[in-house]
Image (cartoon, coloured by chain):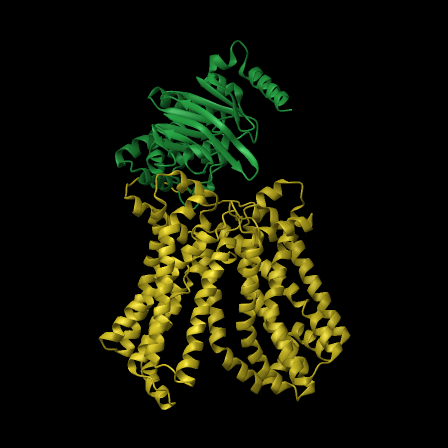
Chain colours: A yellow, B green
Amino acid sequence: MLGKLIKLRLQNILSRTTARRKNGKGMLVLFALLMVYCFGVFGFLFYQMFGMMAETLAPVPPYHWFYFAMIGLMSFGISFFFTAFTAKSELFEATDNELLLSMPIRPRTILLSRMAILLGIEYLISLLVVVPAGIAWFRAVGVNAAQLVLYIVGSAFLPLISASIACLVGWLLARLTARARNKTLVTMIFSLAFLAIYFVVYFNAQRYITTLMQNYQSVADGMMGWGFLFFWYGRGVAEPHWLYFLLVAALAFAAFTAAFLLLGKGFLKVSSSENIQKRRTGALALRSSKLSSALLRKEFKRFTSSAIYMLNCGLGLVLMVIAAVALVVKADAVRELLPRLQGMGLRLSELDLVLIVSIVTALISSMNCITAPSISLEGKTLWILRAAPIPSNAILAAKLKLHMLLCALPTLLLSCAAGYVLRPGAAGWIALLIVPQLFVLLNGVFGLMMNLCFPKLDWINEAVPIKQSASVMLTMLLMMAYSILIVIGFVILVLLNRLLTPTAFLLIALGVALVWLLLSALWLWKNGAKRFERL
Amino acid sequence: MLRINDLTKHYGQKCAVDHLTLHIRPGELCAFIGHNGAGKTTTLKACVGILDFDGGEIYIDGKSVRKEPLACKQIIAYVPDNPDLYEFMTADKYLDFICDVYGVSAQDRRERIQKYAEMLELENDLLQPIASFSHGMKQKLALIAALAHAPKLLIMDEPFVGLDPKAAHAVKQVMHEHCKAGGAIFFSTHVLEVAEKLCDRVAIIKDGRLIRSGTMEEVRGDASLEDVFMELEDDHAGQTD
């Protein structure tokens, strides 16, 4: 039964469902592409980071364990960080929980199947650290067969612990939000707190690593106490020390079993959605409005009612506001940027800098992919729109309009902040105001197009269309790929080979984006309604 | 009001609806009965315009569902078998949304919503989130939403499933009122007693084919609808064997 439940869950994650096509091959390819991308970006970052550590620690054999302890700590932290909220939705908020609980299946079997999926996600995330860190180490010190085997086997233990803790945090969050009047708000607050921690660590990572390497002896001594788990893991793998290795294994299995037994007791209660919200009272207040306003209001309500939707597809809105404030606060430092770049031999004019900033602003705004899951999110309620006398184009327009309304203002704010700092001429202001809005529109139109091409309407957990669907992945991946291409192109064609002037290159990049936008819009105009009606 | 001519729909190799022809006039209440998988829901969805079909034509009040889908949808209402509604809304906001979509004036919507909410005993729950509703409450809300724009044709898929006896009685009353006022209703049901007592027309479908239709008297004669239905099912099974 456990195997069947896991298979069912995996099928739900991997399947792409339309009336016409029911194979998951496309989705698998996309997952593979996403994995390659993540491994490329994160792998490079972690390889650099651990490469620095390996250089420092390789000549000091008594502290070899510290290197592996740091791998353990980093892998543990990252896995836990990225799965705490997934644990909440995966374990306790799946819409098929009640159906499964009504069947002659033990609640613990359902729980274990969910925990197994979460563990799988933990393994995938931990690989982002373990693989590049391992390569960095074995390149620095050479391959030791025993150490390599223990490293591979030992790496399977730590995710068991991080998964256990993530499950417990997920349970706690599910309990807290179940009792809260405004679940979305509570979830948002917790999520933003998590993200704040993430960004603080991310932006200070370099400084932390440098400090760590300067003081590794004292940190290592401390780790023997507070970080005994990682100390055992480090010694177990590095020396190799079998006792420590077995201790970590025992602790990992014990933690997972304990979490499973503990959560098993309350699984039925938490997952069977006890609704203790207060009843709203008052007079019935009905008000009429135009069709377009009603559709837009419905889209807005859909967006704001889901913390997972807001956080995954609208986080850029918050970041843009923060970036705008940061730009104004650090205005002097930014103004000094151009002379400093020119001092480094880069032939950049003021307009070039403004164009670069406008494209950076545009790329930040591309983080918001509100339209990409918007059709999938209709799910089983799609019949309401389909049965109503609403032109399909009006439905698609409402989704796009919400994207534009939500994204345009923060983008404009960031553009104005950049303008205030850089004080460009008329051409610069035009670039700052128009280029980012062009990307906002591109993201909205392209996201909608992708969702029409890759709809996912049979989800049982709204995290699936938002976080694991082809449309969101493709929209984000292609936007990111384009931004990476711009950076690479700028470095190769402008900075290194001077084949193009910065302005010419950036205008070409903008032209490509414009063509992309026009093609997407044309596709949407010609095929959007037809596709929607065939869903 | 509803004219289905030679409707055909395939799902891959399987023929779900096979050259089905059926007419329902204004004021008629027509039950659509058949075994599970007979093609009832497919037919209803095709009539509502949410499922494309391979052959034939469907006219609502003289307008083609294929050629003028919006004009048809404007005068019909659909209540599905499983009322999946916007759980992120409260019931009043959902009704407001539906009324906005159909362009119902503020006064009309207030009057109709109050009337049907009272009939179905949902008036005290209209301010609550739909997510907190039971299946029956959602079914009632879907029905109020369907009636809020005073449709000429009401298409319902198993409307009595999940309703308590009192609500089911109220729904029957609403259906009668609707037809008395000149509207038409086409609904599927497995409850033959309800169909027999409530409807003046009945259509029986088996394996996608309409095997009998007409007034209740024509179809059942002196026997009960259940007897006729079982007999037809057996006869048809014999023929297909």
Seen as rendered, the residue at the extreme right is A242
**Where's residue A224, x and y in %?**
66, 78
Can you see residue B135? yes
Q: Nearer the viewer, residue A172 or A430?
A: A430
Q: Nearer the viewer, residue B231 or A217?
A: B231
Residue B21 lies in quadrant: top left
Q: Nearer the viewer, residue A72 or A291?
A: A291
Can you see residue A70? no
Vertical placement of residue A213 versus A236, above or below: below
Vertical placement of residue A308 versus B7, above or below: below
- Residue drawn at point x = 67 percent, y = 88 percent: A60
**Where's residue B41, x and y in %?**
50, 32
Vertical placement of residue A172 versus A106, above or below: below
Seen as rendered, the residue at the extreme left is A426
Q: Is residue B20 left or right of residue A358?
A: right
Q: Nearer the viewer, residue B122 or A524?
A: A524
**Where's residue A225, x and y in %?**
65, 76
- Residue drawn at point x = 36 percent, y = 62 percent: A517
Residue B175 lies in quadrant: top left
Q: Is residue B89 left or right of residue B8?
A: left
Q: How many marks?
A: 0
- Residue drawn at point x = 32 percent, y = 79 percent: A352
**Where's residue A248, x and y in %?**
71, 69
